[in-house]
Image (cartoon, rainbow, N blue to C red):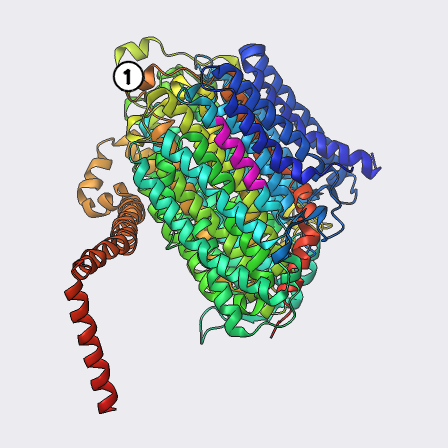
Amino acid sequence: MSLPLLSLVIWLPIFGAVAVLSLGEHRPVMVRRVAFGIAAATFILSLPLFTGFDSTSYAMQFVEDAPWIPTFGIRYSLGVDGISAPLILLTTLSTILVVLAGWESIQYRVSQYMAAFLVMEGVMNGAFAAMDAILFYVFWEGMLIPMFLIIGIWGGPRRIYATIKFFLYTFLGSVFMLVALIYLGYLTGSFNILKIQALDHLGLTAQVLIFIAFMLAFAVKVPMWPVHTWLPDAHVEAPTGGSVILAAIMLKMGGYGFLRLSLPITPDGSQLLSGLMIALSLIAVVYIGFVALVQQDMKKLIAYSSISHMGFVTLGTFAAFTALSMGSHNAAVLGVEGGVVQMVSHGFISGAMFLCVGVLYDRVHSRLISDYGGVANTMPIFATLMVLFAMANSGLPGTSGFVGEFMVILGAFQANVWYAFWAATSLILGAAYTLWMVKRVVFGPIGNDHVAALSDINNREFVILGVLALFVLLLGLWPAPLVDMMRESVSHLVDQIGHSKL
Amino acid sequence: MDNPVNMQSVYLTIVLAPLLGSLAAGLFGWKIGRAGAHWATILGVAISFLLSLIVFKHLVMDGALPFDGTIYTWLVSGGGLRLEVGFRVDELTAVMLVVVTFVSLMVHIYTIGYMHEDPGYTRFFSYIALFTFAMLMLVMANNFLQLFFGWEGVGVVSYLLIGFWFKRESAIYASLKAFLVNRVGDFGFVLGIAAIYRYCGALDYTTVFQKIPALAGQTLSLWPGNEWSVITLICILLFIGAMSKSAQVPLHVWLPDSMEGPTPISALIHAATMVTAGIFMVARMSPIFEYSETALSVVLVIGSITAFFMGLLGLVQNDIKRVVAYSTLSQLGYMTVALGASAYAAGVFHLMTHAFFKALLFLGAGSVIIAMHHDQDIRHMGGLRKYMPITYWTGLIGSLALIGFPGFSGFFSKDAIISAVEASQLPGAGVAYVAVLSGVFVTALYSFRMFFLVFHGQERMDHHTREHLHETPPVVTVPLIALAIPSMIVGAFFVGPMLFEHPGFFGHSIFVLPQHDVLGEMAHHWHGPLAFVVHSLSSPVLWLAMAGLGTAYLFYMVWPNLPDLVLAQTGLFYQVLMEKYGFDRFYDSFFAGGGRRFGRFLWQVGDVTLIDGVMVNGTAKAVGWISSIVRYIQSGFLYHYAFAMILGLLFLLGWFLVA
């Protein structure tokens, strides 16, 4: 295969967005079809990343490389390994679903809406595929713009507050990363991420400072406690599609950043601060779990649930250091793998949960739990799917939500019994906040006239939720293909972080 | 049939047939209709049942070797952990297979009659077939991952079925409660699995059981200055899981409320099968539990508390299903006690006899409920014997089996448990013996209190109900008869081979250390079931049961005013029983209410006030405030700036001069 696949999955949607924009606002039907076509084509183009992936190697694959700004040695280099390839596939799939989800509910500036999501797709793929630090940074910051517009234009009543908060929070985090990246590029003589990772010597002070600079960027994105408060606001104000992309993909940027940059570049700094990171992760799981319990707004509840679930990603990642220091390479690998599986699974589940809320919002125009009750009476098919996703969100075995959490708990128990203890409370808390919401929204007698007038999901909505349900079950019943894909890359990463640079 | 490949496809069919039936009813119920749904699921379960009989004969009668094989690889970690989905079918599994598929089949048939007016008919069949699938996955697992899958799978179907009538607030409350309490147990269970992985490096039974003996003596420090035996920790964590699933004190609170579900599932899930999963699990894990006497003592004591105190609650309930539910709790306590005394085989034996007679009692209660037009209060019944002869006689058989009347199946299993506890040397065995012995009296009392109130005495129902009283249709009574037969005879048939004879019925599927082998001790005095019955005439067990029966007769047949007099004398005690010892009230205010209060506190104080208020918006305000001050300095007047420069100069000069 000689096609530059990675470039295609980055630039096809971006140029496609230009094409969609050029169609203008007076042909919405055409706009939707073209946008869907581009998203579908991108998805198909991304499939070889799975089918053609060589899972026996940790090396970068589908590599592309060309000079970009030769004066500074900045290159346009792309490549994926077993960690980033699944995330790109998740992105291309989610974009199709998001385009479909906005099919009817978006009537205002349709072409700009679709274009924003296509640009978003390309830029996110770029961030996952970039092998040059500066290129990565450009894509990283590039993500902010379309998301800023999506929330700012198609968002809810408090969208201005939410967008500013979102923008400042994330931007503030990432400028420090830029400083660190430039410093590292200067030190290495190249901005190639693999070369920066291979840097042999780096003092502890430098490592700690670089780690903190990275952490500011990544922890905000994940988001980790206590820099998480932008997320509930952003989710509440964002349109359904925006919430889906935010939860399913953008949050993963943080987890991915830790794995791609922080850990391999500053292994000793990470080791030094891993205790703090683990503590923050566990606070996210427990504290946020309790906060999610009392939310009255469904989107806020799912947003908090996302933070809690992402705590497993950072826990799996940083518990690897404790496991390594106890001599258990196996547990370290298991924990990191669990973190990556959790990222992919959370993409499906949180996306599905937000889409479910979107389905209800389109009909009733409320996100408040108290405005519902007894939805199962009028929307039985929807109720079935929502209960399935709720169970996945509670980590039921047989759904994808279980796999990552189980792996992380197994790995964490080896590192320290108490890590596993606190992490496992999510079994109780996750079920409590998710199923209590389901009880109040889906079950019970018909709550009010709005619920009585509900019509069940149409074919388009059924396809969207059905595809996600399929993936949730498939990944839950047979996670082997996904884990096979990342196995070598994660093992290699654990080797890297076990190798001191002092 | 000896070809392992053939057997593997038999096992696969046993599991998949109910699943396919469930999918057919669930996904295509709108197309195949009500009859299509019940035929699809009944066919699936019937296939499973027939194949289970074949497996039973193959393993237990023909003495074929147990099967242990992989179906597919679930996941392989780069860290070497290999998780597979596979089956381990030995004698223990074979017994469970027959019990589960038989009771499930009976319940499927019964449901045709019980639910025939319900709009959720196809959904109900889909759920109970799905339940059967999950339960079979659980008992056939050869590793902890699949065990947990089945474990949670039955939990989720139980959740769906308790909340089956989802319009009823009490039903959806009960279903949420059941799921969350079970999750508390699963919390322990999952940590137990993680501990096993840490110390054994694998999660398949074979490897784990091989490595456990070497862990004896190894300790782990959970907090400074304390050392836990690793095996004890593993056992207690696993047992926490069993406590929630098998409703042991203090995680029992969900089971009485689960009676909100339709009666067929009370029989299938909350009496015969799912709730016994914990018992099965501990028996399956006997190669681990045997190495921790501390854990066995815990099991023994928890079981005896449940057996006695939950039985007492059965005395004051007036809802026919709740009486049976508390009886189930108490009987699960007996099974747990047996496990604690290392008499695993007796626990599983009681599990089996209980599955038959308790399913019978529940379905009988359901039959009464149908006749009573869904009135479940036993104070409104009475004298039903003449209207419902089949329900009456099968109910009598079930009750006699439950109280352990000599010759009936429950007699053999319960007597064996009590003798085993008596013989046990573990700490706590003395208390447990007293508890299970007094429990016999209580069991007989509440069983026959209900029996007399329902079937004998005055007819207390209203005129309208009485006019329509009649025996239920054959789809209801045939399963009753089919369950009554094993409730009578299965004990006498199996007590010898299952508990005492050699080669043991369970082969190597249950492991007991020689120093704990109470059943082995008892086997020396084993002279066949008849001698067992004769011997019981001189034991206190039988006389306690008779005393309970007699008391019930006295109270509810001879002097119906007596119970009220007794209650008047024991007001406080009665109040405690009515309050169910206060567990519900405490959990509701402390855990449910406390959790919400804590969440609100964290949200309002942590997120809204501190993080957003002080840190985020505070930073924004501080920036605004500083710039509003700095703005005054930038006045735009040249002489202000010149003045500031001179002041600065003077200050610097002064600084240098002093320094």
Q: Position of residue B549 (x, y in %)?
A: 38, 37
Q: Tell me which secondary structure the magenta stretch mostly adopts.
A: helix
Q: Position of residue B626 (x, y in %)?
A: 22, 59
B211, B551: nearer the viewer: B211
Q: Which residues are magenta?
A: A114-125
**Is A364 rendered above or below residue A249?**
above
Answer yes or no: is residue B485 visible. no
B579, B143: nearer the viewer: B143
Q: Chain of mark 1?
A: A
Answer yes or no: is residue B374 visible. yes
**Is B636 rendered above or below residue B118?**
below
Q: Position of residue A312 (x, y in %)?
A: 50, 51
Residue drawn at (58%, 31%), measured in percent from left and top? A15
Residue A491 falls inside the magenta stretch: no
Residue A116 falls inside the magenta stretch: yes
Residue drawn at (34%, 25%), measured in percent from left and top? A444
Q: Secondary structure at mark 1?
A: helix
Which residue is most to the front?
Answer: B638
B646, A502: nearer the viewer: B646
Q: Is residue B461 toward the left or the right of residue B48 in the image? A: left
Mark 1 surroundings within 10 Å by alpha-carbon count, few (fewer than 14), some (14 through 19), many (20 or more): few
Tally of numbered discs: 1
* Quarter occupied by the N terminus of chain A: top right
Quadrant for residue B41, please give it.
Answer: top right
Q: Position of residue B255 (x, y in %)?
A: 40, 38
Residue position marked by numbered label 1 in the rendering = A449
